[in-house]
Amino acid sequence: MNKYDIIIIGAGPAGLTAALYALRANKKVLILEAKTYGGQIINANLIENYPGLPSISGFEYATNLYNQVKDLKGEFKFEKVLKITKNKTVTTTKNKYQAHAIIIATGAETRKLNLPNEEKFLGNGISYCATCDGAFYKDKIIAVNGGGNTALEDALYLSNLAHTVYLIHRRKEFRSEKKYQEALKSKKNIKIILNSTIESLNGAEKLESLTLINTDGEKTTLTLDGLFIAIGRTPQNEIFKNVVELDEFGYIISPDGIHTKTKNIYVAGDTRQKLLRQLTTAVSDGSIAATIAIEEMAK
C-alpha cells in the first residue's frame, strides 16, 4: 500500500492550498480528486474579489494553483474516494492509500435547476454566487431563485447593485428567517414572485429571459440580464460519516473549523459548517488545516 504523510481529498482551492503548504514543509502529499482540479471556482467567468488579483478568470486561477502544486511535486490521482478509516486508510475506485493525516476538502456542490441551457449560460447570465458576480450586474435587471436565507440575503445584497431584482420562489411563503423577510420590505427595487417555478432559460449565447409557470399553470416571460440560483448546496460527506460528525444538512461539524472527531483527520473549505463560503475562506482553511496537521504529526 502506498503511504504518504498527508492525503488531501479534493482539489479545489482549499485542498490545493493545503497541498501547497504541506509540500513547502517537505511532506509527501497525495491529492485525490474525483473529477477535475479547481472545484466550483473553475467555472467562474471572472474573480474580482480576491485580494491582490483585481481580475482573473476562475479557470486561470485554478490552473495557476494546480501548476504551483505540481511544480512542488504534489502527486495527483484522479480517483473517486469510496471510504476512509480511522487508521487513515483511503479506499478509492482504483487503489488503497495510507497516510499519517487526512484533510477532507471535498467542497459542496450547488443545487441546480437541471434545465436546458443552464450549463451553457453559466458565466453568461447565470451564477450561483451573488457576492462573487453581483458587481457584473450593476444597474441591470436580474432575478434570484430560492426561498431560504441564502436567497433572501442574495436578493438584499444585489438590490444595492442592480436596477431591479426579482425574487422567485416556488412556495407561497419564504422559508428564511423573519429578519430577512422584514428587510425585504424596505427595498423598493425587489419584486417578489411567489408560487412560481422557472420552466425554461431562454437566449442565444447568453441568458435573455425566463419562462415562469405558477401553481395555476399560467406562464409568463421575464426579460432580464442575469439569474442567481440559490436553492441550496449539497456536500458529499456521507462516505465519511464513520470518521466525522455531520449536521442535518450534511456538512462536517468541527468545533474549531479544522479538527474532526477523529484524530489526524481534518476538514477544510466549503464541506464544513461555516459562515461564509468564498474563495478567500477556502484558501484560509486549507493553509490552517495543513499547518495544524504538520504540527500535530510532529508530536
Image (cartoon, helix red, strand yellow):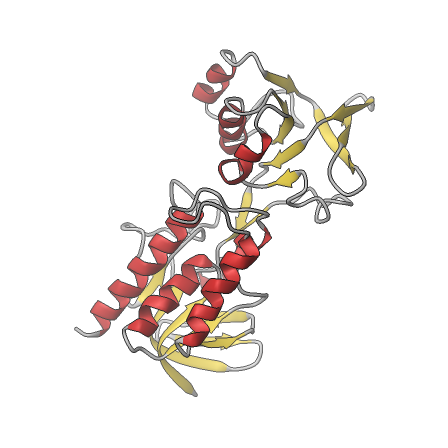
**Looking at the image, can residue 78 be seen?**
yes
Asked if residue 274 lies left or right of residue 288, the reply is right
Position in image of residue 59 (x %, y %): 56, 57
Above or below residue 188? Residue 22 is below
Residue, far bottom:
1
Quarter location, residue 19: bottom left
Tell me how many marks there are. Answer: 0
Position in image of residue 87 (x %, y %): 35, 76
Q: Nearer the viewer, residue 262 or 166?
A: 166
**Looking at the image, can residue 259 be seen?**
no
Q: Residue at x 43, y 69 (%)?
A: 68
Q: Residue at x 55, y 46 (%)?
A: 46
Q: Nearer the viewer, residue 127 or 84?
A: 127
Asked if residue 26 lies left or right of residue 91, the reply is left
Above or below residue 156? Residue 246 is below
Q: Residue at x 54, y 45 (%)?
A: 233
Position in image of residue 259 (x %, y %): 29, 58
Asked if residue 294 lies left or right of residue 111, the reply is left
Position in image of residue 269 (x %, y %): 41, 54
Q: Residue at x 25, y 63 (%)?
A: 292
Q: Nearer the viewer, residue 274 or 248?
A: 274
Above or below residue 75? Residue 159 is above
The image quadrant where one finds the C terminus is: bottom left
The image quadrant where one finds the N terminus is: bottom left
